[in-house]
Amino acid sequence: MPASAPIRVGVFDIGMVLLSFDFSRAAARLAPRCTLPVARMADALWADGLVDAYDRGRVSCDDFSAEAARRLGFSGTSGELLEAWVDIFEPNPAMFARVRRWKARGLPLYLLSNTCESHVRFFTGHWDIFREFDGAVYSCRVGALKPEPSIYHALFEGHGVDPQEAIYLDDLPANVAAARALGMRAFEYRNEEKILGPLRSLGLD
C-alpha cells in the first residue's frame, strides 16, 4: 500500500500523551511509612528489572506489591501500596478532546501502551475517555514492551490494524521510530503546539 494511503485508524500511547504522570506523588504518599529515604525509592524499585517485569506481566500485582514493600521498608498493606502506585496520573484535556473528535469522524481508535495491570485497572476505571477506544494492547498482557516489534504486531494482528493506514502518537522517540519502521505514520507528542502541524498535514487536528 502506498505511503499516501488515507488515515483510517488512530493509535495512542497513554503515559505523557493521554495522561501525564509523576511517580514522585507515589513516593511522597508512601514515604511516611517507609524506612527507605524518598531519594532512594526509584532506584530501589527499578533495580534488577522489577518494574519492567511488572510492565511485561511477568510479575503479578500481589508479587509486585510484596517485593516493592520489602525494598522500600513499607509497613502498610499491599492494597495501600498499590493505591499509591496508581495515583500518579493527570488527564491531558487537549488529547481527550482529540480522541472524541477523531471518534466522531469515524476513526477506529486503539491504545498501545507500556503499562502494568494495576495502572490499567486504575485509568480504565477512572476516566470515561477509555470507553471511546475500540481495543487496546497493553505490555502487561502481551509480554512485550515498546519499542520491541512484537508489541506493535500484537496491535496489527490482534486487532486487524493495517500499519500504513494508522497514525500513532507517542512521547518517546524510540517508540515512534519503531512504529515508523513498521509502516505507521508516527509522531512524537510533546505538547499541543508541536503536534498540530504534523496532524494538520494529514487532515487531522
Image (cartoon, rainbow, N blue to C red):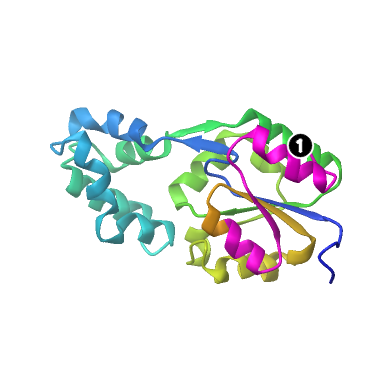
Can residue 161 be spotted in the picture?
Answer: no
Left or right, 187 with respect to 83, comes to right
Residue at point 56% right, 66% down?
151
Residue at mark 1: 100
Q: In this rendering, is residue 142 above or below 70?
A: below
Residue at screen point 29% across, 48% down? 65
Q: Residues within 10 Å of mark 1 (few under 14, many from 20)?
A: some
Q: Is residue 177 magenta?
A: yes
Looking at the figure, which quarter contains the C terminus?
top right
Q: Nearer the viewer, residue 86 or 194?
A: 194
In the image, residue 129 above or below residue 6: above
Q: Classify the position of the N terminus by image quarter.
A: bottom right
Which quadrant would residue 135 be assigned to in this image?
bottom right
Q: Over which residues does the magenta segment extend?
A: 176-205
Residue 37, position as x, y percentages in the image: 16, 35
Q: Quadrant of residue 179?
A: bottom right
Residue 45 location (% of width, % of height): 27, 49
Mark 1: amino acid: Arg
Q: Which is more toward the observer, 203 or 119?
A: 203
**Residue at x-position 54% and y-position 54%:** 173
Percent x, y of residue 25:
36, 31
Q: Residue 175: x percent and y percent?
A: 55, 58
Foreground residue among 199 and 125: 199
**In the displayed structure image, the side of residue 198 where residue 124 appears, left or right:** left
Q: Pick out the residue farthest to the left.
A: 35
Number of labels in the image equals 1
Residue drawn 37% across the image and 36% down it: 83
- Give yes or no for residue 157 being in the magenta stretch: no
Q: Secondary structure at mark 1?
A: helix
